[in-house]
Amino acid sequence: MPNVRLLVLFGYVIAAFFLQRHMIYHPPEPSKIFVKYLARCVRIVLALGIPLISPLIAYLWVDFSPLPLVIVVLLATVLPLGLLYVPWLWRMQVPKPLLFTVIVAIIVFLVLLGIFVWVYGSNDGRGITWALLPMLYFILIPPAFMLMFLYIWAPTILPLSPEEQRGSHLQATRLITGFLSTFPRPVIVVEHGELETRIAGNPFVGTGPGLLVTEPHNAVVRYRGTVADCVIGPGVFFTERGHNFPAVIDLQGQFRVTSGVEAQTRDNINVRVPCSSIFRIQGSKEPSAPGRPWEYNPEAALRAYLATEVNPARQPSKLEAHRTLNWADMPLHEAGYIIQHVLKRHTLDQLYAIKEPQPEELPRLAIAKEVREHVITQMAAIGIQVTAGGVGNRIVPTDPAIVKQRLESWKAQKMQIIELDRGKAKAKEIEEQGRVRSEALVELTKNLQKEIEVLQGIESEEAKKLITLLLLQTLDEIAQQPEIKAQLPATTTETLAALQHRASQS
């Protein structure tokens, strides 16, 4: 008999060793298909109970117990199941544990009833003694200690602050128990602004709470079923039934720019307008100290998210009538909408301010101011604070042929102005030449009159020669005047000098 017991003990130790190694290298994994509620309870009990060696401890009491080996093994199996694991399932709020409890209660009742029948029917009442208490102690203490240790240790494996760990023992233990059921609620982490599911699960029929972990500058929109409930974060949160998280809201300052807002001017020319916007969620503030989360207005963040389904009338086509936008794209979308309306009031020439009379303020600056004020007002109503932004200076027609055509048109206008100015200058030059000639003739006439009066006593032939010589000298003096010399050909002076030399010789 001792050899048989030793063989059984040896077989049990080997089985326990390989079973525990299997549990270490093959931990519970979330199932991709629905796991029935009864199966979840069984998997939780197996995951908690199999790694223990309480049956071995009970086995060591066989020789010291007044009960047979079979009864000791049955007690080591059903007592922890009925007194510890079933209450644990109810405390951990495992869904629908009633059927499992009824089955366990029936098994425990039948086992205890069978033991009492054997003790009082076949063993004449022998076996129920005080010697059973140490054995029962070592049967119940190992699983009880393990469950207590799990309850105390559970918050330390989660990314919780020391203050949060002190109040999260029950929720953290429920989270781990749900994972052991192989059909938990999901564990979701926000990393680099994106939602990542670390542990797959079902938010509606999964076991235990789920978990949400965000970055310090991110908040998450929480849905309860199909209704947007609130915006939570940053931080670590336990999630309940029906919670799901479709979107992340970045609390940092946002900058968006585009060069592709297409609009039409009043003269029906399609242009491309650059636009930019700097904004953030209302109330968003940087943390006052390192390691602390960002502050913000959760109601404003929820309004910004709920406004993502834009007005169908503002969409370019019916196919995009109910297209939803990310909240961070809405300031530029609103700016593009108002740009299309504002530019329709101006022609292309007015946008470039190339026609008279010149406005006091450039049209592009006025358009940028109007767009900015409109966007600030509209975004403030949905929880977005716009701090800067506007319309760029480079407004360009989308068709290159139009650009070329407008350049030729502007060139023709400028050439017309140049030709008009040139004609006016030429007319003024001719007018000035006529005035100078008239003054020269008047002066010449006066000088000739004076000389004729002086030569009245000389013979007529000599007088004519002198008059001719004086006339040439007078013309040469007039030609030497700067304002007249500039208007005469270069050979005029030489011609007059030659004529005077010939007249002097004669």
Image (cartoon, rainbow, N blue to C red):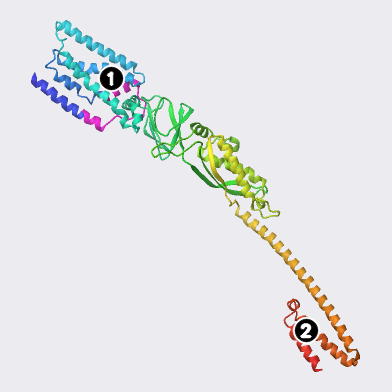
On residue 476, which mark appears? Answer: 2
Nearer to me, 343 or 425 = 425
As drawn, 440 above or below 213: below
Mark 2 crowd level (few <14, some 14–19, many ≥20, 10 Å Cα)? some
* In the image, residue 70 lies in the stretch drawn in magenta: no
Q: Whole-percent x and y of residue 87?
A: 30, 17
Q: Label for residue 85?
A: 1
Q: Which residue: 86% across, 80% down?
A: 446
Q: Is residue 292 left or right of residue 495?
A: left
Circles 1 and 2: CB atoms closer than 8 Å: no
265 lies above or below 5: below
Q: Secondary structure at mark 2?
A: helix
Can you give x and y, in whole percent of width and height, for residue 469 in the image? 82, 88
Q: Is residue 255 visible?
A: yes
For badge 1, the amino acid type reads Tyr
By secondary structure, the bulk of the magenta-drawn segment is best described as helix
Tell me if 434 is positioned left or right of 156 in this view. right
Q: Which residues are magenta?
A: 19-48
